[in-house]
Image (cartoon, coloured by chain):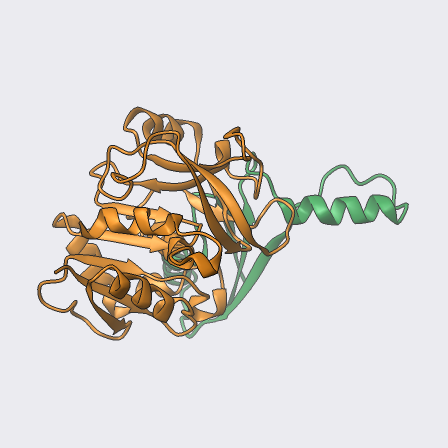
Amino acid sequence: MSSVAVIQFPGTNCDLDTKYAFEKLGCDTTVVWHKETKLPENTNLVVIAGGFSYGDYLRSGAIAQFSPIMKAIVAYAKDGGKVLGICNGFQILTEVGLLPGALKRNIGLHFISKYQTLKVVNNSNEFLQKCDKDEILNIPIAHADGNYYIDEEGYKKLEENSQILVRYCNERGERAVVNGSVTSIAGICNIEKNVFGLMPHPERAIEDILGSIDGVKMLEGLVA
Amino acid sequence: MKAIVNIFLKEGVLDPQGKAIHHALDAMNFEGVEDVRMGKQIVLKLTSTSRDDALQEVEKMAEDILANTVIEDYTIELI
């Protein structure tokens, strides 16, 4: 059984949904408060859940990167441990430097909350191993700062190393402009493919009653 | 001594908020605005009496947390 550590900062609000999702997948899941300096022993996966850590003050994720638990998470990731950042978790992972680029205010300035189709760009990683390449997934998004930015040189590296995980698309799989992200990027991973970040919320698409179960095959890949 | 840190999105990085303000100014018939950039200002009250030390310290703060240098530039003014 996989042991999952879900990180909770002041202002995190997807911790219990995320815990519920991984428990449904049969994982032993612990919510870890950001003041902790160590991850639980035998942690197989760290998930930085979504929300508004520190009220998004200064910049989304900017303050959270200096919480005590982050040192343990950076060390864990550098040691090859798997880390997933969802929404605010993605923002925190870019701020702390575990993932390249940054997330800016949405191009239309609105907070966007809706189901969104995503296209799987690369599945040569643990996270999306259960998804097909070019598969279209239906996953909710809910963010104001999801406009992914990376400079040209950085973008080339993402392409070359198959680090782009998913892009926003329409029902036909064509790229869709949702929040202004560079080439409609919705999620990426690091070169080593053990740190993953995405703006959409797979933990909110795990039961038919929620409108989609596509989140299951995303999360499953990390705890298989 | 006070340090004023101004933070703006880098030139070349699209500023959606600046664009929206520009659009509103146009709609209000304010003419002659070529471009609008929106940033933030952080004012720090410092105990240091040495300008050099203060500048060095505030630069480190800006690099480490106040600005995200992937997308933002900053200026520091000491008064």
> Which of the 4 image quarters holds residue B9?
top right
Give how far across and how far down residue B8 sits, in percent.
56, 49
Q: Which chain is green?
A: B
Image: A30 above or below A60: below
Q: Residue at x 54, y 35 (%)?
A: A171
Task: Identify the colour of chain A in the image.
Answer: orange
Q: Is residue A70 above or below residue A81?
A: below
User: Residue A32 appears at what percent x and percent y?
Assistant: 25, 72
At x 34%, y 30%, the residue is: A133
Please tell me whether residue A61 is drawn above or below residue A127 in the rendered image. Answer: below
Q: Which residue is most to the left?
A: A42
Q: Quadrant of the N terminus of chain A?
A: bottom left
Q: Please indicate whether residue B45 sits to the left or right of residue B34 in the image.
A: left
Total marks drawn? Answer: 0
Residue at figure coordinates x 25%, y 65% from the top left? A23
The spot of residue B16 in percent (x, y) is 63, 45
Q: Residue furthest right?
A: B29
Residue at left offset 25%, top offset 50%: A220
